[in-house]
Image (spheres, rainbow, N blue to C red):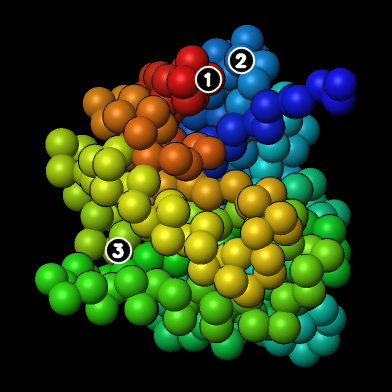
Amino acid sequence: MAKVTKRKKLVVGNWKMNPQTLEESQKIFKGIKKVFGKVKNVEVLVCPPYTYIQPLNKILEPLKLGAQDVFFESVGSFTGEVSASMLVDAGCAYVIIGHSERRAMGETSEIVSKKIATAVKENLKIILCVGENVRDTSGDYLEFLKNQLKDSLVGMQKRYLSNIVIAYEPVWLIGKSYGNAMSGQDVQEISIFIKKVLADIYGKDESSKNLILYGGSVAPINAKDIIEHGQVDGFLVGRQSLEPTGFNEIIKIVSEA
Ligand code: 13P
């Protein structure tokens, strides 16, 4: 009988526009590396600002690096933009696309879908962020989520599907008090919903390979409940990924779940 191997869970640190110096970034990175080196069943990825990617790449193993964004054209006169091939060249294995903080600055799902198309061609793995801005009692947020997911994946070929990780980040729970994070039970409902939307687009067999992450005020005090009851494969972590102690604790919780 074929041996069934459990797929690796994934913990992603999104540093956003932090910290302010390369020296600090190296200190945090090394602090995470120290504990993570001992964890075998979890893949850990740090997404620093662009300018730290290459220097951190020199002290990489066994961590992985990702970027927080990418441009949708592959080459040319686009002042201020960074291409997918540049990210690969700098040492990135992943890229976050469609984070709510970028969507709030005007990034539409159409732009997101173009970025995905460019990134998959360069063999980058993608953390696609989706999440509603608010919750209503009539369930409109589910429709919003479905459309955001479908529109972001427009034109994405089935063969690239396994390169896409879906990060569910309810916008109203980002940057909030850790005690108010979503319960595992509530995350589970959304996780099942996302799997159903993906299955409707790509078929059940294909979409069952996608990892689903939860993000939004994740910390050691809420990680256990979410990973044990949320039917997710890991986390997308903001503030706590800049705190090696907290981040390492989250990695440990995921590893033991
Ligand atoms: P916090 O974990 O700080 O709430 O940030 C979540 C997030 O936006 C990660 O991408």
Labelled pair 3, 1 in contact (Cβ < 8 Å): no
Of 97 and 56, nearer the camera is 97
Cβ(mark 1) to ligand 1 < 8 Å? no
Q: Quadrant of the N terminus?
A: top right
Residue at 78%, 74% in the rendered image: 157
Query: Mark 3 = which residue?
Result: 171
Q: Of discs 1 and 2, which sits in the foreground? A: 1
Marks 1/2 in contact by CB < 8 Å: the verdict is: yes
Q: Is residue 4 left or right of residue 122?
A: left
- Residue depicted at 58% across the width and 66% down the height: 198
Q: Is mark 2 within 8 Å of ligand 1?
A: no
Q: Amino acid at mark 2?
A: Val
- List x then y, in percent, for residue 122: 85, 64
Three-letter amino acid code at the position of disc 1: Ser
Q: Amino acid at mark 3?
A: Val
The residue where tag 2 is placed is: 39
Asked if residue 27 shows in the view, the reply is no
Cα distance in 3D space between marks 1 and 2: 7 Å
Earlier along the polypeptide chain: callout 1 or callout 2? 2
Mark 1 or mark 3, which is nearer the start of the sequence?
3
Horizontal and vertical percent position of residue 215? 39, 49
